[in-house]
Image (cartoon, rainbow, N blue to C red):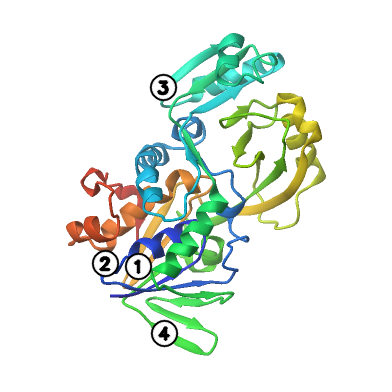
Amino acid sequence: MKIAVVGGGLIGRLMAWRLSHASSGCQVELFDKGMASGTGSAGYIAAAMVAPVAESVIAGPLVTQLGFRTLQLWPALLADLELPVFYQQAGSLILAHAQDRGDLLSFQQRLKNSNALKTLNARQIAELEPELGYRFNQGLYIENEAQIDNRKLYQALLEALQQNAVKMHWQKPVVVEGNTIVCGTQTMQYDWVIDCRGMGAKADMQNNRARQLRGVRGEVARVYAPEVNISRPIRLMHPRYPIYIVPKPDKQYVIGATEIESESEKPVTVRSSMELLSAAYSVHSGFAEAHIEALDSGLRPTMTDNDPCIQVEQGLMRINGLYRHGFLLAPAILEQALIRLFQDSAKTIADSTLGSINFQNATQCEALFFS
């Protein structure tokens, strides 16, 4: 089967990689308007948390259900990559300064899946994060939530695509017309085209008034902080929105939160950068000496109802709307897309595309699909 994947961000790379396994019988090509590094995609900028309970404060039941499935899938997927990718499942810590106690209680009350939740005092916070206990006397701990080194994952997936002999077309914007792709002066037809372009597919997804695509702007800072030792994602209650601080390898941290209903692609604002960096400093004074590696902004492709979707037409599948939940959703979305793509060949998928993942545990999520 000849398949084109359009879009080389997180879900596009995962899809092209799984479909290109030698035993799948698929001939796969990948098209993207950006560079092979993926620097222009939302997933490259992201903090890459896998936190279904913490995100349930703003997310609906579909996202939460898929998120719990993703926690099962990530270790198996990463184990199939030759290049090691940092992944940890040490839980999430939610903190608040004394004046923001009300926000912490509100956050706790809005959690939809709190079975793994623990309420912490200062001593218990210090046991989890020794450098933070003296600053906070109240917090919540959500067990088993995870995070990934997203940039290493992009690199590992690129190498895997090369090893699988996927023909890749970088810096090649295309037009998608059913199962046909127009790239410059070339017109190419495939058995299936899988459109994973995110915001690049906006114009093509406006035919359904109930579920249209929009961009939600996010801004993050990436810093190198050798004086800070935080071992798990931290969410800090803030008067405007919770701010997260996510540790990455080599003493780097991603600090983010801003969620702006705007499709502006301008650089990070002074206001946002000051809020992010001052909040980080209020968590740990070692951030005062951190080096700012990058201030990035990006658009998260988001459907009207904030839920992800898979749109299926004749020879065309569009996967979109992962919003701020790319790493929380991508493996589970991939699984459901492959079920639909090969709905009469579940065993073949289990053996060839999903590899060591137990395909029989997949949960059908019909709410994902629309025509």
Residue 21, given in percent of the width and then of the height, sits at 32, 65
Q: Earlier in the sequence, mark 4 or mark 2?
A: 2
Q: Quadrant of the C terminus?
A: bottom left
Rendered image quadrant of residue 254: top right
Contact between marks 3 and 1 (CB within 8 A): the answer is: no
Q: Around disc 3, counting alpha carbons within 10 Å, would you say few (fewer than 14), some (14 to 19), or many (20 or more)?
A: few
Mark 1 lies on residue: 20
- What residue lies at 39% left-to-right and 39% top-to-bottom? 71
Q: Earlier in the sequence, mark 2 or mark 3?
A: 2
Give the residue type that dot 3 points to. Ala
Question: CA gap, disc 2 to disc 3?
Answer: 38 Å
- Residue 273 seen by the camera: yes
Q: Is residue 90 above or below residue 67?
A: above
Q: Depth-wise, is mark 4 or mark 2 nearer the camera?
A: 2
Which secondary structure lies at badge 1? Answer: loop
Q: Around disc 2, counting alpha carbons within 10 Å, would you say few (fewer than 14), some (14 to 19), or many (20 or more)?
A: some
Question: CA gap, disc 1 to disc 2?
Answer: 7 Å
- What residue lies at 80% left-to-right and 41% top-to-bottom? 271
Mark 2 lies on residue: 24
